[in-house]
Amino acid sequence: MDLTVVAYIIYLLISIGLTVWVARTLSRNGRVFIGDVLQGNEKLADAVNQLLVVGFYLVNIGFVTLYLRSGEDIVRARDLFEALSVKLGVVLLVLGFMHLGNVWVLNKMRRRGLMERNQTPPVPPQGWTAPGWTAQTRA
Protein backbone atom coordinates (compact mmCIF):
# COMPACT_ATOMS: atom_id res chain seq x y z
CA MET A 1 0.00 0.00 0.00
CA ASP A 2 1.24 3.45 -0.90
CA LEU A 3 2.23 5.69 2.03
CA THR A 4 0.06 8.47 0.61
CA VAL A 5 -3.01 6.28 1.04
CA VAL A 6 -1.88 5.44 4.59
CA ALA A 7 -1.57 9.17 5.29
CA TYR A 8 -5.09 9.74 3.94
CA ILE A 9 -6.55 7.01 6.13
CA ILE A 10 -4.79 8.20 9.29
CA TYR A 11 -5.72 11.81 8.54
CA LEU A 12 -9.39 10.97 8.04
CA LEU A 13 -9.61 8.81 11.16
CA ILE A 14 -7.97 11.38 13.43
CA SER A 15 -9.72 14.41 11.90
CA ILE A 16 -13.20 12.91 11.98
CA GLY A 17 -12.59 11.56 15.49
CA LEU A 18 -11.54 15.01 16.70
CA THR A 19 -14.56 16.59 15.00
CA VAL A 20 -16.94 14.16 16.70
CA TRP A 21 -15.29 14.72 20.09
CA VAL A 22 -15.44 18.53 19.82
CA ALA A 23 -19.06 18.43 18.59
CA ARG A 24 -20.13 16.21 21.49
CA THR A 25 -18.34 18.46 23.97
CA LEU A 26 -19.97 21.57 22.50
CA SER A 27 -23.36 19.88 22.47
CA ARG A 28 -23.18 18.70 26.06
CA ASN A 29 -21.84 21.94 27.55
CA GLY A 30 -23.49 24.41 25.17
CA ARG A 31 -26.94 23.11 26.00
CA VAL A 32 -26.75 24.92 29.34
CA PHE A 33 -26.21 28.26 27.58
CA ILE A 34 -28.98 27.60 25.07
CA GLY A 35 -31.38 26.59 27.86
CA ASP A 36 -30.58 29.82 29.69
CA VAL A 37 -31.12 31.92 26.57
CA LEU A 38 -34.44 30.23 25.84
CA GLN A 39 -35.57 30.69 29.45
CA GLY A 40 -35.88 27.02 30.28
CA ASN A 41 -37.71 25.85 27.14
CA GLU A 42 -36.09 22.39 27.10
CA LYS A 43 -37.59 21.15 23.83
CA LEU A 44 -36.52 24.25 21.94
CA ALA A 45 -33.07 24.18 23.57
CA ASP A 46 -32.59 20.56 22.47
CA ALA A 47 -33.72 21.37 18.92
CA VAL A 48 -31.41 24.38 18.59
CA ASN A 49 -28.54 22.41 20.10
CA GLN A 50 -29.06 19.57 17.62
CA LEU A 51 -29.17 22.01 14.70
CA LEU A 52 -25.90 23.60 15.83
CA VAL A 53 -24.26 20.17 16.10
CA VAL A 54 -25.38 19.18 12.59
CA GLY A 55 -24.04 22.45 11.19
CA PHE A 56 -20.77 21.94 13.03
CA TYR A 57 -20.42 18.44 11.55
CA LEU A 58 -21.24 19.61 8.04
CA VAL A 59 -18.75 22.48 8.07
CA ASN A 60 -15.89 20.59 9.68
CA ILE A 61 -16.22 17.27 7.89
CA GLY A 62 -16.65 19.18 4.64
CA PHE A 63 -13.42 21.02 5.34
CA VAL A 64 -11.61 17.80 6.31
CA THR A 65 -12.61 16.11 3.07
CA LEU A 66 -11.75 19.14 0.92
CA TYR A 67 -8.36 19.37 2.60
CA LEU A 68 -7.63 15.66 2.12
CA ARG A 69 -5.66 15.87 -1.11
CA SER A 70 -1.92 16.16 -0.76
CA GLY A 71 0.18 17.89 -3.39
CA GLU A 72 3.36 16.03 -2.50
CA ASP A 73 4.35 12.40 -2.81
CA ILE A 74 4.87 10.57 0.44
CA VAL A 75 7.64 8.02 0.04
CA ARG A 76 9.22 7.81 3.50
CA ALA A 77 7.85 7.55 7.01
CA ARG A 78 9.26 11.00 7.72
CA ASP A 79 7.22 12.47 4.85
CA LEU A 80 4.15 10.73 6.27
CA PHE A 81 4.57 12.34 9.70
CA GLU A 82 5.33 15.76 8.24
CA ALA A 83 2.28 15.71 5.97
CA LEU A 84 0.05 14.48 8.80
CA SER A 85 1.35 17.11 11.21
CA VAL A 86 0.58 19.92 8.79
CA LYS A 87 -2.85 18.60 7.87
CA LEU A 88 -3.89 17.77 11.43
CA GLY A 89 -2.52 21.09 12.68
CA VAL A 90 -4.70 22.97 10.21
CA VAL A 91 -7.73 20.84 11.14
CA LEU A 92 -7.11 21.52 14.84
CA LEU A 93 -6.90 25.25 14.17
CA VAL A 94 -10.15 25.19 12.19
CA LEU A 95 -11.85 23.18 14.95
CA GLY A 96 -10.53 25.64 17.53
CA PHE A 97 -11.85 28.63 15.59
CA MET A 98 -15.21 26.91 15.10
CA HIS A 99 -15.33 26.15 18.82
CA LEU A 100 -14.51 29.75 19.73
CA GLY A 101 -17.08 30.96 17.22
CA ASN A 102 -19.76 28.74 18.74
CA VAL A 103 -18.90 29.90 22.26
CA TRP A 104 -18.97 33.53 21.11
CA VAL A 105 -22.39 33.10 19.46
CA LEU A 106 -23.80 31.28 22.49
CA ASN A 107 -22.46 34.01 24.79
CA LYS A 108 -24.03 36.71 22.59
CA MET A 109 -27.35 34.85 22.66
CA ARG A 110 -27.13 34.49 26.44
CA ARG A 111 -26.30 38.17 26.98
CA ARG A 112 -29.17 39.23 24.74
CA GLY A 113 -31.54 36.99 26.69
CA LEU A 114 -30.33 38.45 29.99
CA MET A 115 -30.77 41.99 28.70
CA GLU A 116 -34.30 41.24 27.48
CA ARG A 117 -35.22 39.79 30.87
CA ASN A 118 -33.83 42.82 32.69
CA GLN A 119 -35.78 45.44 30.74
CA THR A 120 -38.19 46.11 33.56
CA PRO A 121 -37.79 49.55 35.10
CA PRO A 122 -35.82 49.65 38.35
CA VAL A 123 -38.66 51.44 40.18
CA PRO A 124 -42.38 51.42 39.49
CA PRO A 125 -43.79 54.48 37.69
CA GLN A 126 -44.78 57.24 40.11
CA GLY A 127 -47.26 59.12 37.99
CA TRP A 128 -48.78 59.77 34.61
CA THR A 129 -48.07 62.62 32.24
CA ALA A 130 -50.56 63.73 29.62
CA PRO A 131 -49.43 63.68 25.99
CA GLY A 132 -48.06 66.96 24.71
CA TRP A 133 -46.71 68.11 28.07
CA THR A 134 -43.49 70.07 27.78
CA ALA A 135 -41.41 72.19 30.07
CA GLN A 136 -42.68 75.34 28.33
CA THR A 137 -46.36 74.62 29.15
CA ARG A 138 -45.49 74.24 32.80
CA ALA A 139 -43.71 77.61 33.08
Image (spheres, helix red, strand yellow):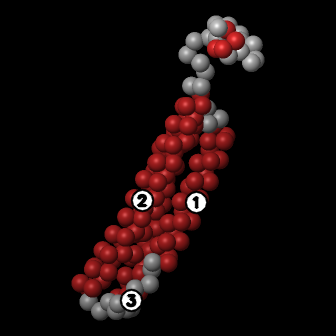
Res 21 visible: no
**Residue depicted at x 62% and y 42%:** 45
**Residue depicted at x 58% and y 48%:** 49
Res 97 visible: yes
**CB within 8 Å, label 2 to label 3:** no
Q: Residues within 10 Å of mark 2 (few under 14, many from 20)?
A: few
The span from disc 1 to disc 3 (Cα, nearest Å) is: 29 Å
- In the figure, is residue 30 to the left or right of 81? right
Closer to the eye: label 2 or 3: 2
**Residue depicted at x 50% and y 66%:** 60
Mark 2 is on which residue type?
A: Phe
Number of numbered discs overlaid on the protein picture = 3
What residue is pinned by disc 3? 71
What residue is pinned by disc 1? 55
Mark 3 is on which residue type?
A: Gly
Q: Can you name the residue that lies furthest to the right here?
A: 131
What residue is pinned by disc 2? 97
**Residue 130, percent from left and from top:** 75, 13
Q: Residues within 10 Å of mark 1 (few under 14, many from 20)?
A: few
Quarter occupied by the C terminus: top right
Q: Quadrant of residue 117?
A: top right
